[in-house]
Image: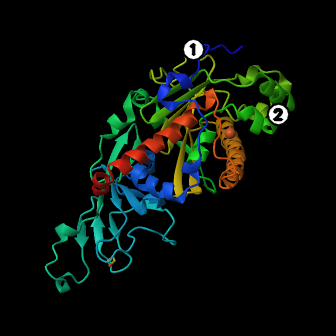
Amino acid sequence: MARWPKPPEGSWTQHYPGLGTQPISYEDSISPAFYELERKAVFRRTWLNVGRVELLPRNGSYFTKELAVARTSIIVARDMQGRVRAFHNICRHRGNKLVWKDYPREETSGVCRQFTCKYHGWRYDLDGALAFVQQESEFFDLDKKDYGLVPVHCEVWEGFIFVHLAKQPEQPLRDFLGPMITALEGYPFDKMTERWHYRSEVKANWKIYMDAFQEFYHAPVLHARQSPPSYAKAAQEAGFEAPHYRIEGPHRLISTAGVRAWELDAEMRKPIDEICRSGLFGPWDSPDLGPLPAGVNPARCDPWGLDSFQLFPNFTILIWGQGWYITYHYWPTSHNSHIFEGTLYFVPAKTPRERIAHELAAVSFKEFGLQDANTLEATQSMLESRVVQRFPLSDQEVLCRHLHRETAKWVDEYRRNGARAAQQ
Ligand code: FES
Ligand SMILES: [Fe+2]
């Protein structure tokens, strides 16, 4: 039987008195003007995760990342010294996008020794230095040293690559992450190199989708038909309460208890789960990861389900008690659309059974994610009617409340210090 500490007396929301308890507005998710502010106030002023070091397996590996929200594209590369670097993806000659394959707006990746512009053939080393100019003698006083690629601040934490688009970040990455996130240091992210990736454009504001993964009590309702009827009925009757919510600076955490699926009555399980020994919550047989860092399973749940760390603004690391993890990225493309990326990471399968267990977890995740995304497009379309302006949030929606409050705070601060921020 599951056991976990009871939530402390009183509400979660009231632990954070600055948040208030009143109904909230979603104007921040439907207003084009607010989105224009967010671009500068949030996305150009925070550390943004663009992937993991496994995407750059050797010197010369690179990938591009389209950052529509910041109106730029960047190249992230491992240089010949093994250092991870980032640059704006623009040629210094006449502004061509430097790295792209068949379609200029699509991301690409590969391995090379230099980046060569498709237009007139200027070449750049992996550290950004301009190395070759076609018909150089015909230029006027051109010193190649002045025309390197425009660098982007780039730091790596626990294998996660972050970039910052300001001229000078207000904080180093680790300070920005703060103690709640850095308490994950030592988690074996580097062992989980088997990767499953989904990407989809969702016609909803990025915060609306983040909200869908910041509380889980919708699951027994919205996702009821994903489970056998007897399980769904029991789950809905019991309701759901997460044992731990935490807010620290701009970041958030929700942690939940788990289920030992293999101990449930047979009619509570799906036959496919039984055959594959896996399901939405991951493989039933977990790898031996050794001792885990203090930052995971903060409520000491047994069994432990998952911890979802929401890193401001648009990145989530979700660590499963069964020894695997997922990341979510939400890349805004307009006030009412964004690209959602979900990536699952496992310790590489050594047997066909392990591989099948991973695959079932990956497709189950996709089914649930699609169900959420579908609902959110319906939500977005009606929020835009502005027929209703105030929406009540329950205590378990405390993290949703915080995300909207935090975003508003960054936007207000930017408005107040507009002149200073514009110079950054
Ligand atoms: S624009 Fe790149 S070489 Fe001319
Ligand atoms: Fe959901």
- Residue 40 x, y percent position in the rendering: 40, 55
Q: Residue at x 72, y 34 (%)?
A: 219
Amino acid type of disc 1? Pro
Look at the numbered disc 2 and give the secondary structure of its residue. Answer: helix
Judge the density around disc 2: few (<14), some (14-19), many (≥20) Cα neighbours within 10 Å.
few
Q: Residue at x 66, y 13 (%)?
A: 3
Specify the label residue 271 is tagged with. Answer: 2
- Residue 49 x, y percent position in the rendering: 43, 46
Q: Is mark 2 within 8 Å of ligand 2?
A: no
Looking at the image, residue 104 sits to the left or right of residue 373; the answer is left
- Position of the C terminus by quadrant: bottom left
**Label located before the other in sequence (2 or 1):** 1
Q: Between 101 and 177, which is closer to the camera in this rendering?
A: 177
2 and 1 marks in contact (CB < 8 Å):
no
Q: CA distance from mark 2 to mark 1?
A: 38 Å
- Residue 236 x, y percent position in the rendering: 79, 28
Count the marks.
Answer: 2
Quadrant of the displayed image that contains ligand 1: bottom left
Q: Residue at x 81, y 27 (%)?
A: 231
Look at discs 2 and 1 and give the one toward the viewer: 1
Q: Is mark 1 within 8 Å of ligand 2?
A: no
From the image, tell me which residue sits under label 1. Answer: 8
Amino acid type of disc 2? Pro
- Position of the N terminus by quadrant: top right
Q: Residue furthest bottom?
A: 138
Looking at the image, residue 369 sits to the left or right of residue 122; the answer is right
